[in-house]
Amino acid sequence: MTAQVIETHPIEGQQPGTSGLRKKTRVFMQTHFLENYVQSIFDGIGGVSGKQLVIGGDGRFFNDTAIKIILRMAAANSAKACIVGQNGILSTPAASHLIRTRKTDGGLILSASHNPGGEDEDFGLKYNGPNGGPANETTTDKIFARTKSLTNYRIWDGGDVDLATLGTTHIGEMAVEVIDPITDYADLMEELFDFDAIRALFASGFTLRFDAMHAVTGPYACEVLQNRLGAPVGSVVNEIPLPDFGGGHPDPNPIWAKDLMDCMYGANAPDFGAASDGDGDRNMIVGKSCYVSPSDSLAVLADLAHLAPAYSTGLAGVARSMPTSAAADRVAAAKGIPSFETPTGWKFFGNLLDAGKVTLCGEESAGTGSNHVREKDGLWAVLLWLNILAAKRMSVAELLADHWQRYGRNYYSRHDYEAVDSEAAHGLVNDLRAALADLPGQTFGSLTIERADEFAYNDPVDGSHSAAQGLRVFFEGGARVVFRLSGTGTQGATLRVYLEQLETDPSKLDKDPQDALADIIAAADALAGIRAKTGRNAPDVIT
Ligand code: VG1
Ligand code: CO
């Protein structure tokens, strides 16, 4: 058995998006496709000779096959060791934690996150650096550049590893250590939060339903919530990870987690509901008849995180992605701590976290996290909520109402138009970009545009510049609409329209967001021509 050098040729379209490379699974399964991309990652990060890597994924179809190929390639590229989750499983936050605790040179995470899984669905792969966070744009640019010049890749001939058995084996000189993917992560959660208080909350009769959506978080949630915190068995549902997520769409929002929503809005609803996504980095929080928007969740957590031991001395700062509502900024301002606005995608939070400028980060897409790892973390967010509820002994609805009374409410919604004709979607964005300069002063119904621009980001830590991160239109009185094309889809283009309006009148905090935002929704269509240009009458998904 030896390292083979296999001739190949560059494959088009291997450009990483918001979170690694995502394609249809069958595309990843095409001859050389995965191998080319893996070799490009290795070359793009300066080779893996003598290095240690963490490897794991969310268990979707092709996960284990791909991991075995990656291991053979790492061995042929002279890596020193690979640490792999048992059966190829590692949630994204657990992988981030492992990279950090084991001080490896980074890791490869196999996931298409919230995208459905299966032979005819989606697959994905991303590289995280030694800090445990998604590679920055400089690195992903190098990886992409390499995909365009690659002429061969290296792979070990033979070297099949048993991923089910814990312990260390070898492929050639390279050690392959198969580890229990749960324990280290569960231990970390126990360090961060007041498990005694949460245990007492459950012991007092507080009820929970955690929907793992047949994705990777099931085993983690069973261990932490049921085994360690005493929530009754059965509190975690859909807890067995399946290669096709049971045919579902592992996106924790009211549309795709409808079962949970029905339960939480029905008779005899539990006190607290939560769901997570394919790779375990996102969360949905819902109380009895009370959905918490991710932007509000970030704001509540920023306000009350000090109730958990890990954050008892307060937060250094808070960061949110640009399309996320400004609710967290209002908390930061009140507390006198800095707030940062970054482009969409967790890779932009890494520098701020590493530099100690922020403690908490979040996105409107249901990603929330802190400096405990360098990824967003679904179960962590659930535990912080539980820790806060255990300390406050209020319901989710009471907590949210109290928050809005104190800070005002940033009414918020995201409208997604999925699998739109790519040319039409890019046309819409290009037309709007060209019109931005003329928008100020224009009126749409009762709304007047104050300013409009295309968001660009200058990283305050390394000075890097990221252009073209979404079109923003601000109205007089504090309303805002943002237009952006998704960077995680695999079919056509997905247009995301983010809508926001601040309300501080205490008597107007209980509206349905779609009603509260009706004028902005109409203005968004009028100024971008959404219906006319996409041919769609309504969004596919409203969150
Ligand atoms: C989406 C979300 C973004 C998130 C990204 C990866 O990106 O909007 O907030 O960071 O997914 O999350 P896009 O480009 O489709 O809008 V995950 O949980 O898919 O790794
Ligand atoms: Co995810």
Image (cartoon, helix red, strand yellow):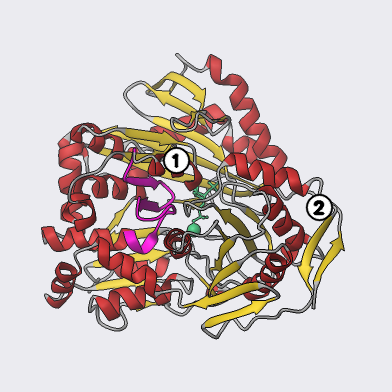
Q: Which mark is residue 351?
A: 1
Left or right: residue 123 versus residue 323 is right
Identified by mark 1, the residue type is Asn
Residue 300 drawn above or below residue 39: above
| Residue shown at the point (11%, 75%) measured from the top left | 204
Q: Image quadrant of residue 428?
A: top right
Residue 66 in view (yes/no) = yes
| Residue shown at the point (65%, 57%) measured from the top left | 48
Give the secondary structure at mark 2.
loop
Assess mark 2: CB under 8 A from ligand 1? no
Spatial separation of the CA atoms under disc 2 and disc 1: 31 Å
| Residue shown at the point (43%, 77%) measured from the top left | 238
In this view of the protein, which residue sits in the foreground, 110 or 258?
Answer: 110
In this view of the protein, which residue sits in the foreground, 44 or 90?
Answer: 44
Left or right: residue 263 versus residue 423 is left
In this view of the protein, which residue sits in the foreground, 533 or 221?
Answer: 221
Give the secondary structure at mark 1.
helix
Left or right: residue 3 versus residue 356 is right
> In the image, residue 319 lies at what x, y percent?
36, 40
Residue count near mark 1 (Cα–Cα under 10 Å), binned few <14, some 14–19, many ≥20: some
| Residue shown at the point (22%, 41%) measured from the top left | 509
Q: Is residue 424 magenta?
A: no
Q: Which circle, 2 or 1, is nearer the viewer?
A: 1
Residue count near mark 2 (Cα–Cα under 10 Å), binned few <14, some 14–19, many ≥20: some
> In the image, residue 345 lies at what x, y percent?
50, 45
Question: Which stretch did the figure color magenta?
Answer: 357-380
Mark 2 — residue? 11
> In the image, residue 102 lies at what x, y percent?
46, 63
